[in-house]
Image (spheres, rainbow, N blue to C red):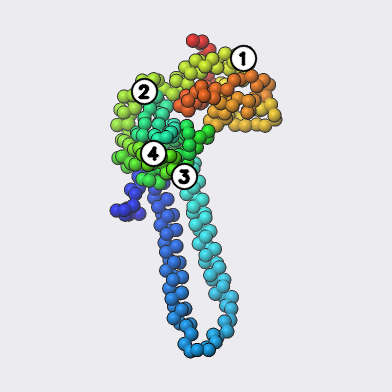
């Protein structure tokens, strides 16, 4: 689809799909607006009262006409629904292989955390032609991550992880906005997505990360918080073994079964009594207020990494 001068550039694989649906909706709406307006004018002139006391002719219902104006809008409505649902499902389901990056919204900035350790504020570097999955949360109020060139927008909500993804198709710099009014300086909560060639991105990636990878940061924090004393790899601790727990089903003391995903691990750190693992006592203290959102993300990445290898039992 050719780009219009006043329309945002198309810079992701989803942009064309979203635009096609958008222009279809606009075209259908415009067609019926013109049609209804024309019919109103036509009927007002054609059937106007020409003489005082004139009585209109009796209207004989037409079954064919009624079926026509019922079936056609129904068909158009179904096309819009299934087309929109298809775009939504594609946009909400990232591919299997993605570049994972965390984003935290806060009045009034965007903080990005790469798995290799690089951190960015209000600027995100990504490679062109590769699917990027963002996992976002907020430290304070609801924000909305909006990149017009990628046709991507999703709410970033406190206490919840939101997943969104994109695959940039053009190198360049693209505006990032907060599309949810979040306070008096909401309009200043802006940023830039920098799309680079893969080789340039690798060079940029190699130039940062002084604090180590997100997994190593989480491992250090895991030890600093003394989590290692309860979550022992030998099963002798007072807490469950974490090796291989991420993504698995967990039996709880109340009979429920939950999946150990990002949200479960976050809740287990901040509200340990909410979902107690079967066979264990609710003795774990809460770490609410003791760890930041970025530290929570590093702990999650560390637990994710515990697949098929033992916990580092080295105490500080």
Pointer 2 or 3: first along the chain: 3
- The residue closer to the viewer here, 220 or 17, is 220
Circle 1 crowding by C-alpha within 10 Å: few under 14, some 14–19, many from 20: some
- Kindly identify which numbered label has been placed on residue 209: 2
Q: Disc 3 on helix, strand or loop?
A: helix
Give the mark, 3 or 4, whose residue is nearer the N terminus: 3
Sequence-first tag of 1 and 3: 3
Determine which of the numbered discs, if any, sits on residue 91 in the image.
3
Q: Identify whether 75 is placed above or below 206.
A: below
Badge number at residue 237 = 1
* Residue at figure coordinates x 40%, y 20% from the top left: 212
Residue depicted at x 39% and y 39%: 185
Pick the residue in front: 17 or 52: 52
Tag in front: 3 or 4 = 4
Cα gap from disc 2 to disc 3, whole angstroms: 30 Å
Tag 2: Cα neighbours inside 10 Å, few (<14), some, or many (≥20)? Answer: some
In the displayed structure, 29 sits above or below 246; it is below
Q: Position of residue 71 (x, y in %)?
A: 55, 67
Report if the CB atoms under discs 4 and 1 are less than 8 Å apart. no
Whether residue 195 appears in this view of the structure is: no
Q: Residues within 10 Å of mark 4 (few under 14, many from 20)?
A: few
């Amino acid at each position: 689809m050719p780009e219009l001068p006043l329309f945002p550039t198309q810079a992701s694989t989803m942009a064309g799909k979203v635009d096609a649906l958008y222009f279809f909706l606009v075209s259908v709406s415009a067609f019926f607006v013109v049609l209804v307006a024309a019919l109103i004018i036509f009927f007002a002139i054609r059937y106007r009262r020409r003489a005082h006391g004139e009585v209109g002719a009796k209207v004989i219902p037409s079954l064919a006409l009624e079926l026509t104006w019922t079936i056609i809008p129904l068909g158009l409505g179904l096309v819009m629904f299934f087309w929109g649902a298809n775009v939504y499902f594609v946009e909400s389901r990232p591919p299997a292989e993605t570049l994972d990056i965390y984003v935290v919204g806060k009045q009034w900035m965007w903080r990005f955390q790469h798995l290799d350790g690089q951190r960015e504020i209000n600027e995100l570097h990504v490679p062109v032609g590769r699917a990027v999955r963002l996992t976002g949360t907020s430290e304070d109020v609801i924000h909305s991550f909006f990149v017009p060139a990628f046709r991507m927008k999703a709410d970033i909500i406190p206490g919840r992880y939101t997943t969104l993804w994109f695959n940039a198709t053009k190198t360049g710099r693209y505006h990032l906005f907060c599309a949810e009014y979040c306070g008096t300086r909401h309009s200043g909560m802006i940023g830039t997505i920098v799309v680079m060639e893969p080789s340039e991105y690798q060079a940029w990636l190699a130039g940062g990360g002084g604090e180590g990878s997100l997994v190593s940061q989480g491992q250090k924090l895991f030890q600093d918080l003394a989590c290692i004393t309860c979550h022992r790899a030998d099963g002798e601790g007072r807490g469950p073994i974490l090796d291989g727990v991420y993504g698995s089903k967990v039996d709880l003391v109340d009979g429920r079964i939950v999946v150990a995903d990002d949200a479960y691990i976050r809740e287990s750190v901040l509200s340990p009594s909410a979902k107690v693992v079967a066979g264990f006592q609710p003795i774990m203290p809460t770490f609410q207020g003791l760890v930041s959102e970025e530290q929570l993300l590093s702990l999650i990445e560390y637990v994710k990494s515990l697949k098929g290898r033992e916990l580092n039992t080295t105490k500080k």
